[in-house]
Image: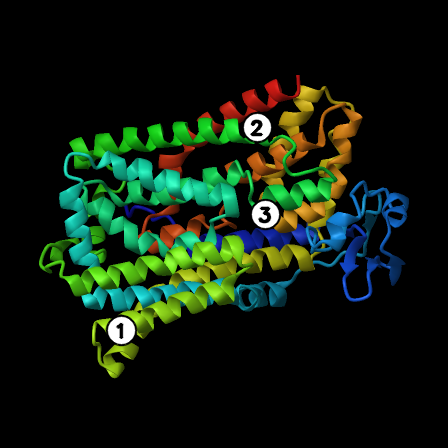
Amino acid sequence: MRKLKFPTAQTILIIIAIIVALLTWLVPAGKYDSLAYNAKNNSFIKTSLEKTIELPATQETLENLHIKIPIEKFTNGDIYKPIGIPNTYKELESKPQGLAELVQAPIKGIIAASDIIFLILIIGGLIGIMNLTGAFDAGIAWMAKMLKGREYILIILVTTLIAAGGTTFGLAEETMAFYPILIPVFLAAKYDAMVGLACIFLGSGVGSMCSTTNPFSTIIASDAAGINWTTGLENRLIMLAICLIITIIYILHYAKRVKADPSKSLIYDQKEELEALFGLHSMNTTTYTNRLRLITVVFSLCFVIMIVGVSFLDWWFVEMTATFFVGAIIIGLIAKIKESIFVEEFAKGAASLLSVAFIVGIARGVTILMEDGLISDTILYHASTITEGLNKGIFTNFMLFIYGGLSFFMPSSSGMAVLTMPIMSPLADTVNIGRETIVDTYNYGMGLFYLINPTGLILAALAIVKIGFNKWLKFIMPLVLILLITTMVLLTISVY
């Protein structure tokens, strides 16, 4: 009997899109009114089903709308997206998504996600040029020699550094650049590709889950909840330390087992394929010359400049993409690559990540289906009503699961914050807990589900590393359970 093969990431997302389209026929349509700040004439734009009206940008306007947020949060740009207005949910005429909308959704998603798609393609081009120079092979061979016997340092270092990026500025999409670069390093250290994937993805995931100064989650969510982002910071720092230690120990345990006996690897059947894919068979053939060292420095500087730009210069995808593009050109000049060969290899490198770019676009298309079908706000409305009258410990943990579920429908952390916080944060007042607890449940709920969320980034990451979603689930689920129990215990302690 022929063994059934687990579907590809693209097929999984298309199946999810079909399910979401069916949900738009079953879940009633509905919408909250929204409020946006217009900086040009210092006013609010209130959008409802009936009309769009302009209101004065004053604290009194916010109070009349039952929005407990200081006006300064809008005027100084902390809240830059439209927020949901509490108690304004209305059912609408159903807007089911049919076959035409289902077919168009991936295309719309690819167009909507063009910024991150171009970042991925340009990074692919840069990696193609780097592979041509031989700097990767020589540098990885040198690093493997330096770390011999102390390879575990690599796991601790990579996971911690990426978690630091996640917790401070929301390092997430940018990690797509790290997989093709770091996976060969882990393979050279006699680990499997799962270890490298885990260090990068879990580092980002745990860092973002326990966000401290991340402007795209904690800060914007605190602003939308009407509190200072430093409120509850101590709890989040404790949570970050505990979850990061648990994660590193979990990865080290798996890595030690694989290093001792490669057949214990969850992806042992792909060992030869992955080593060939990441160039391990041709490793150690290139001398690490001064020219190659300079190329490696330029390549590394691209990431340093990107992180500085995002953290301090208000950069986003256009600037990040331009940084990698310029880096590729400079490396091409240093390596004295002919113009025709440069273009050919750059295009080949970009093409190698095209399937990943499509996954990102299809995932965005699923979100578009939900938005066009007007079911996201309905799910949010019902989620906010079922917590009434609960004990504060039960309420807090219930909110954790609600945010985990909502993140499937709204994987954007900033989008989730501005839509849900004005509606969810007042619920904290009814059970006599601080609003920072709602911010925490939002962070932790989204962060935990992010580790397995097919509408997030995991399928794109798996496509780069050529690992199936089923194998990732087998690896990650024990850790998810441990982190979930830890989170529930710490959240419960925090409200008593």
Secondary element at tag 2: helix
Question: To which residue does mark 3 refer?
Answer: 215
User: Which quadrant, please, contains the N terminus?
Assistant: top left
Q: Position of residue 28 (x, y in %)?
A: 75, 49
- Of the residues shown, which amino acid type is indicated by label 2? Glu
Q: Earlier in the sequence, mark 3 or mark 2?
A: 3
Q: Can you identify the residue that label 2 sits on?
A: 234
Position of residue 177 in the picture relative to residue 233 (left or right): left
Q: Amino acid at mark 1?
A: Gly
Label 2 Cα crowd, 10 Å radius (few <14 / some 14-19 / many 20+): few
Q: Nearer the viewer, residue 207 or 288?
A: 288
Q: Residue at x 76, y 49 (%)?
A: 72
Q: Position of residue 4 (x, y in %)?
A: 34, 47
Query: Quick check: 178 left or right of 51?
Result: left
Image x and y of residue 126, in percent? 32, 66
Image point 39% across, 46% down: which residue? Answer: 469
Q: Quadrant of residue 70?
A: top right
Asked whether, in this view, residue 488 is left or right of residue 243, the answer is: right
Please state, as top left, top right, bottom left or bottom right, where the C terminus lies in the image. top right
Mark before the other along the chain sequence, 1 or 3: 3
Q: Nearer the viewer, residue 241 or 5?
A: 241
Q: Which amino acid, by three-letter code, is at mark 3? A: Pro
Q: Could you give the CA–CA distance between mark 3 and mark 2, rounded to whole angstroms?
A: 17 Å
Q: Which of pointers 2 and 1 lies earlier in the amino acid sequence?
A: 2
Q: Label 1: state its secondary structure.
A: helix
Name of the residue lying farthest toward the bottom: 340
Q: Which mark is residue 332?
A: 1
Q: Quadrant of residue 124?
A: bottom left
Q: Where in the figure is residue 247, as x and y percent of width and height?
A: 39, 31
